[in-house]
């Protein structure tokens, strides 16, 4: 075994297996998007929307916590001396160790951009967790059952807003269209298949997201049609997040998210 | 094994009587959050399931159970979170639904819009899909003009 050197309180060195990479990818999606939504707290366009965004963020944080705990269980089973906890994954990895898709780290922008980003994520996550009800691990299947119910609300909420903004005033329509044009190139990364996860997919342990792409596009096209937004799927897509190649935004997000445990390692309430 | 059974039953009686922090009219047992109480190798092990993944009350419920059981003299207590089967509003009993309504919270009925818990009117409209807690949405009665919480189907 290669020597893993961890400084107390510093970065952890995750011994990534294909399964662990899968868990971290979906946990990171939820954590990073949940953090983005928390940035709206006290700044949303209305009181109701402030609470809605905070609640959506809480759901995602809860989903991330389950998956990080699951990652800790997997790593501790292989190496009990690590004594990993869910917090280690959230607070003690740098940007290149994060596996989230680039979509979720995109800045909030205006309210239209936040809602378009959320529609693009939630439409995917709803399909993905619903398909994951059939995976072989009962713990993951139960997690998928809970997440799918929560994400169905997310998708409805985001779609309602995209429709209202797109089919709204000239200004709201301009902003919604601009957000869609800017974010659409990030959607396809959600459907990338990682080659080393193919055996897990063949064994029914996890679901290959690629098989959901057509259903996803159909959903997004229906929402955009009702929103009277023009939609042109780009011929290329942004990629790299699942391999740890992130844009400049993630580092700034982590600087805020991780500040306290980085400055005061081991601090607890 | 009589003592073990008694200890388990006593611990269940204590844990099941604890109110939910956000809906104090209901106990955590009535809400289906409390799943089991077992004596495992000398440790009273309480299994709870969160309602929503991100429900902030889960940590508080965990603390409430630990405190209540320690106060009752149980020195070794563990509370664990279980996720399977997922929590659902489908398991709430008719009596629990009625308690919710009496508390002014329109209870969940799958596939049906809520009725006003105050005047019973079916002329209602949703104000916001996310209300005072993650499990509730905010509605308004068109007949009596009162706003009310609706416990969402989950």
Image (tube, grey):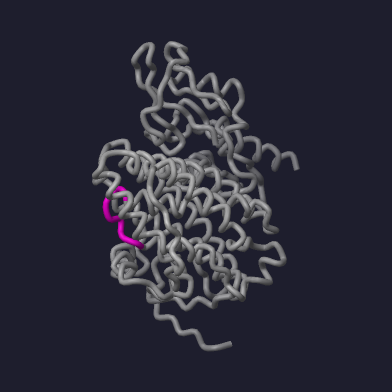
Residue at (25% x, 42% y) in the render: A170
* Depicted A181 relative to depicted A146: above or below: below
Asked if residue B78 can be seen in this view, the reply is: no
Above or below A187: residue A247: below
> Depth check: B131 or B33 in front?
B131
Residue B100, position as x, y percentages in the image? 49, 23
Q: Nearer the viewer, residue B28 or A154?
A: A154
Rendered residue at 56%/51% (across/down): A127
Q: Residue furthest bottom?
A: A2
Residue B66 shown in magenta: no
Total marks shown come to: 0
Residue in the image at 31% along x and 71% along y? A248
The overriding secondary structure of the stretch rendered in magenta is loop
Question: In this rendering, does residue A131 appear at all?
Answer: yes
Q: Nearer the viewer, residue A237 or B60?
A: A237
Q: Give the residues in magenta.
A: A106-112
Q: Quadrant of the C terminus of chain B?
A: top right
Work out whether A29 lies above or below B70: below
Query: Horizontal and vertical percent for residue A179?
Result: 33, 54
Q: Is residue A230 left or right of residue B66?
A: left
- Indicate the quadrant where residue B88 lies: top right
Asked whether A209 or A96 is in front, the reply is A209
Image quadrant assignment for residue B149: top left
Report the quarter where the N terminus of chain B lies. Answer: top right
Horizontal relation, residue A113 to residue A5: left or right: left
Residue found 54% across the figure and 31% down from its top: B17
Measuring from the top left, give residue A247's x and y in whole percent.
34, 71
Is residue B64 positioned above or below B101 on the image?
A: below
Name the spot of residue A30 as percent of width and height, x first: 45, 57
């Amino acid at each position: 075994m290669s020597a893993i050197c961890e400084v107390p309180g510093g970065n952890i060195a995750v011994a990534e297996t294909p399964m662990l990479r899968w868990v971290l990818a979906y946990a990171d999606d939820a954590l990073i998007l949940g953090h983005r939504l928390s940035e709206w707290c006290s700044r949303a366009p209305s009181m109701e929307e402030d609470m809605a965004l905070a609640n959506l963020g809480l759901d995602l944080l809860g989903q991330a916590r389950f998956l990080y705990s699951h990652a800790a269980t997997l790593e501790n089973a292989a190496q009990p001396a690590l004594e990993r906890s869910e917090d280690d994954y959230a607070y003690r990895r740098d940007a290149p160790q994060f596996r989230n898709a680039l979509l979720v780290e995109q800045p909030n922008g205006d309210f239209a951009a936040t809602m378009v980003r959320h529609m693009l994520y939630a439409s995917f996550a709803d399909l993905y967790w619903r398909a994951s009800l059939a995976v072989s691990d009962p713990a993951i299947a139960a997690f998928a059952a809970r997440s799918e119910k929560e994400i169905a609300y997310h998708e409805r909420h985001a779609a309602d807003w995209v429709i209202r903004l797109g089919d709204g005033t000239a200004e709201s329509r301009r902003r919604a269209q601009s957000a869609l044009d800017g974010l659409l190139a990030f959607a396809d990364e959600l459907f990338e298949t990682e080659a080393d996860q193919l055996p897990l997919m063949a064994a029914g342990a996890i679901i290959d997201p690629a098989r959901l792409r057509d259903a996803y596009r159909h959903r997004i096209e229906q929402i955009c049609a009702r929103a009277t937004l023009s939609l042109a799927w780009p011929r290329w897509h942004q990629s790299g997040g699942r391999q740890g190649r992130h844009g400049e935004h993630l580092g700034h997000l982590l600087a805020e998210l991780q500040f306290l445990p980085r400055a005061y390692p081991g601090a607890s309430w | 094994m009589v003592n073990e059974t008694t200890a388990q039953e006593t611990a269940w009686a204590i844990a099941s009587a604890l109110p939910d922090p956000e809906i104090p009219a209901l106990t955590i047992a009535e809400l289906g959050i409390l799943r089991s109480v077992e004596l495992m190798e000398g440790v009273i092990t309480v299994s709870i399931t969160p309602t929503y993944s991100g429900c902030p009350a889960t940590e508080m419920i965990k603390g409430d159970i630990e405190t209540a059981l320690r106060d009752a003299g149980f020195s070794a207590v563990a509370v664990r979170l279980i996720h399977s089967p997922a929590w659902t509003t489908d398991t709430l009993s008719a009596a629990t639904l009625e308690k919710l309504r009496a508390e002014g919270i329109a209870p969940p009925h799958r596939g049906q819009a809520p009725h006003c818990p105050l005047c019973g009117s079916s002329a209602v409209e949703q104000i916001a899909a996310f209300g005072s807690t993650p499990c509730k949405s905010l509605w308004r009665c068109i007949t009596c003009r009162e706003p009310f919480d609706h416990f969402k189907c989950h």
